[in-house]
Every structure is written in C-alpha cells, then in structure tokens.
Amino acid sequence: MSLSQVCGIGILSIALWKIFGRLSRKPKIDLDGPKNDRWLTGNMPKVFQEGLDYCLGLAENYGGAVKLQSVFGEALYISDPLALYHVVVKDQHIFEAADVFIMNNKVIFGDGLIATVGEQHRRQRKLLNPVFSTSNMRELLPTLQLLAHKLTSILVTKLPDDGSCTEIDVLPWLSRSALDSVCQAILGHPSNTLEAVENDEYTEALRMISPMVSKLMQLRPFVPMVMHNFSPYWTRKLVDWITAPWIPTQMMNDVRNMRRIVELMDNGSKKAFAEKKAALETSTTLSPADTNPEVGDLEPGRGKDMMNIMLKANSASSSSEQLTDAELLGQMNVMVFAGLDSTTSALSHCVYLLAKNPLAQARLRSEIRDAIGSVSLTQDGSSFFEQENPLLNLSYDALTNLPFLDGVVRETLRLYPSFPHMPRQVRKATTLPLQFPVRSSSGAEVSAIAVPEKSFVIISILAANRNRKIWGDDANEWKPERWLSSSGRKDAPGTDDPFDGAEVLPSKPSIGVKDGIRYPGVYSNMMTFLGGSRSCIGFKFAEMEMKEILAALMLRMHFELPTDQDANGHTKEIQWKLEAFFTPVVKTPAGDGVTPQVPLNVRLVREEDFTW
C-alpha cells in the first residue's frame, strides 16, 4: 500500500470519527414525522432521490412542519407560510444557508453568491442587485430575441414542408439555447452552441454539472465535515486518494468525473474572465460591433452584458465594497450555472405541458400573434405573416405582460420549481411560529416549534407551492388560467427592489393569498425563487428568457406528445423524475428511464392552430 493510500485511509478514519461524534450530540425536535428509513442518512435519500409523491406526501400527512432524520440528526422539513416568513425574512440571521449547501457550492463554483454568507454575501448582493434591474433586462432582450429566432429557424429546417409531424427531442435544443443565452447575455461571449456540431469542453462541462450533482447527492453531507476539519492541503490529499483509479466503484468514478468537470469549468471561466477584464481595461474606442445591431450585443467587451456591467460597477465601488477577482469569477460561474440548468428545466416543462394541453397551446399562440400583429400594423403596416422575425417588434414590457403567457410561465414554475428544496442551518435556538397547527411527537396539536441550535432545516419549495390551504383543492393541477384572475401581479408590492428582504402585504387580494395569508417569495406569492436576502437574484432574466423562447416556438411550431409505437407496440411516455432536480426521461419499456430527454411530435403551425 502506497504512502498516499495510508494517508488517505487515516484522513477518512478521522472524518468518520468526527461524523459519529456529531451524531451522538444531535439536537432533538418535538414533532411528528415518518419513521427512520436508514440508520445513517435517515429519510434524506427519499426526499432528494425518490420522487415527487414522497415529498408531497410529507406535507399532506404531517402538515407544514415535519420531523425527518438526516446524517446531521433530526431535521425540520417546512412548508408552512408563517414559518417560512421567519426563516427567509424576519429571522434569516438565525436560519443561515446550511454548511452543506455553502461548502459544496464553494467547491464547485468558487466564491460566488450561493457560496457565501454574512458580510461577504451582503457585499456581493449589493453589487449585483443593479445588474439585474428592469432597465438592464430591457437592454438584454434584443440579444435573446436573436437567439430565440435562431433556435426556431434551426428547428423549422428539421420539419417536413407538407405539415406532417416529426419527432424531435427538444431538451438538447432548449439546453443549447439556454447556454447561448447565458454566454452571450451574461458573459458577452458568443458560444454559438446552437450551430455547433458538438460542444467544446467548457460548454460540455457546464451541461454536465447538474446531472453529476444529482448523482453525488449522498456524498454532499460529508464535504463540509472534511473542509471544516482539515486544511486545504490535506483536503486535496483526500480527494487525490478517493479519486485514484485503484477504487473502481461507480461512485468514485462519478467523483472523478465531477472533479474533471469542475476543473474544465474553472479553466474556461478563468479564460473568459481574463478576456473580458482585459477588453474593458484596454478598450478606449468603439468597436465595429457598435454600429451593427445584428452582432453588437454578442461581441466580447460590448458593454451590454451582465459581466461587463458587473465589472464596471465593481470598479466604481469604494475599496471596502469592491469584490476580489476570485469573487467576480465566482459570480460568473454561478450565473452561468443557474441560468443554464434551471431555465432549461423550466422551458422543457413548459413545452411539454403545452404539448399535453393543446387548447392552452392554441390560446397562447393566439395571444402572441394578436400582440405582435397589433404592434406590427401600427409600426409599418406589414402583417404578422410577412415578417421574418416578428418578435423583434415586441418590447420588453409588452412581452412580460402578456396575460396568458405570464400564466403559463408562473404556473409551471409554481408546480415544478427548478430547485425543489433549500437547506438552512439554525445558528441559535429559537421558537418558530406556525400558520397552521401540526402534531408533536406525542400527538398533541402545536402552533409553534422549539428549534434547537445546530439543527437542520429543509425549505420545501415544492410543498409550499402546492399547499392546498393556500392554492385550493386543485393545487396539484396545471392551470395557467388561475393567474388571469389576479388583481395585481407586482412581485414586491410597494417597492421596486424585490431583494431588500421586506415583505409587504398587497392592498388587494391576489393569486396565492388566502384570508390574508401569503408566502414570503419575491415572485408572486410562491417560493420558487425564495425570499429575503438569499432570494434568486436572476429571476427577472429567467422569466424574460422563458417568455421570449416560448413565444418564438409557439408562433412557428405545434407540439404534441409522442404517438408512434415501436416494434413492440410501446409508445414513449415522458416522466419527470424528482431527484435533486426535475429530470425528464422516457419511461420503460419504451425508454430506459434514465437518459434525460423530451421527445415530442413537432410540425409547422397551421392557420387552424390559432383557435382561441
């Protein structure tokens, strides 16, 4: 046995000793909950790996606060609106982002916004808030319009001219589109993934991060334990040891692949960051792109991408508020990751649900056509069908305020949030009030919970967004029209800054509010993008991108679920598996139940498809 192997075994033994020492001191929570499934990991594998029904069943059977077992001891699984208000807004200093979340993100992305806490997180948030302002979204829309047009044009070339259907797996195309969007609108660097025959190493690494995170969920709890107890030198030694080829298990193969992916992403991001920084420092004259609207927003250093805005804002900040290069690089990694996988998942879900609901698809298509037709006739007298890219005439405000398109996006994000769960760690013992009573361990009804210090909290975005007491008996049904009855859709009533942590009750009833009870989210009254100072900073960009791409797709194509049978008489049925994220697969026996894909029958739009 080599010296490195002996060292690795010693480090691992110390880590396990630390883990079992912590488990012997785990805090107790006086709540009802399911029995312990596994002696070490408890119920956590079922929450993060075994599906939608289990997670929703927890809230249905036990209410908005449930006791679970985890590797950290007893954990609190919450979806109660008042409890969540305290966790994410009022007492967020007590319920900080969990070490397992922070440390794993730091390993993968560096010192970005989702890997920092306290004063460092506050500084980063202060700098980044203006980057995602509405005015900047208006500036970025033309870039997304050109990319959405490119996506639809490529897909149209794959369709028969006679109007018949052909099967297309839309998932990789939506992923390529999302990657081009984040690279060009966020980084200001044209990736041209849509037109590439295959991805380069950097873009392929970005595409593989989420699947690898899902595969390695069981190892995530051990990362902070190692990082807290060992120096960076010995941590690297441990990683070198467990990723050595002499451990041939599948999990270790996954760890090796994850390490390679992180290295590729880090190297690619550093190169892009250095180019962007150098371009900004040396550019003193306008580039040729400034006079060409077709390519202007796609050129590095152009000035209308988020990275450029962020670098300029950082240089203009006082020295005490400026971010280091490592922090800026971390923001780039985080924004690209968040803008790629979350948007791809949400877009794929939207297209799938519209294919499943042809009347909703026709209604949406008609709304978009009517809006564009009205603008086009006003501007130059041309009809909708005479324009190559009619969405170029639709402004940011017109696009984001189309009622049914808005409902489709909101309803999909409500039912299928890209991040179904978020962890928190309790820094100080406190009492957590509940909107709706639950049962204690003895079966007594309680309206508040004593939460011990160092206990672990899981925010169930999924269960909160489907709470029948708030959303009604049809909470689990996809109904975009439920949003049309809202009397006001402003996300943060009374303020133009949805990131300041303040939550103000709307003056009029709105969707997701019942008897004055609402969730403390920044996006309507749901928890999809969280609330408070750790809410998703890029939700406006995600919403704009989704609406632009959906509008472009619906105008030119019609989508249906697969209908053809294979040689054995089986028809493809798409299933959305819930692990760490929602993953679409084709159920067996028509598919393997593992490979991510969204195969749909697609054809060119006909006049009769505008039926609403």
Image: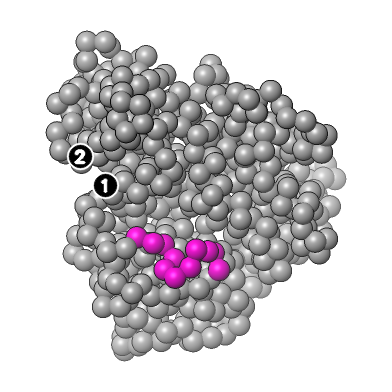
Taking depth in this image into account, of 460 and 328 the one nearest to the observer is 328
Amino acid type, mark 1 = Phe
Provide the residue span drawn in magenta.
489-500
**Above or below — where is 280 with respect to 383?**
below
Badges 1 and 2: C-beta atoms under 8 Å apart? yes
| Residue 11 seen in the figure | no
Taking depth in this image into account, of 10 and 152 the one nearest to the observer is 152
**Above or below — where is 609 with respect to 154?**
below
Position of 212 with respect to 19 (left or right) is: left
Structural crowding at the residue carrying mark 2, measured as other residues with C-alpha within 10 Å and reported as few (<14), some (14–19) or many (≥20):
some
The local secondary structure at tag 1 comes to helix
Kindly report the secondary structure that dominates the magenta region of the rendered protein.
loop
Would you name the residue on which mark 1 appears? 404
- Quarter of the rendering containing residue 99: bottom right
Residue at position x 27%, y 64% in the image: 487
Amino acid type, mark 2 = Arg
Q: Does the magenta run of residues contain 498?
A: yes
Q: Where does the image place residue 160, in percent across and percent down from the top left?
A: 28, 12
Taking depth in this image into account, of 537 and 30 the one nearest to the observer is 537
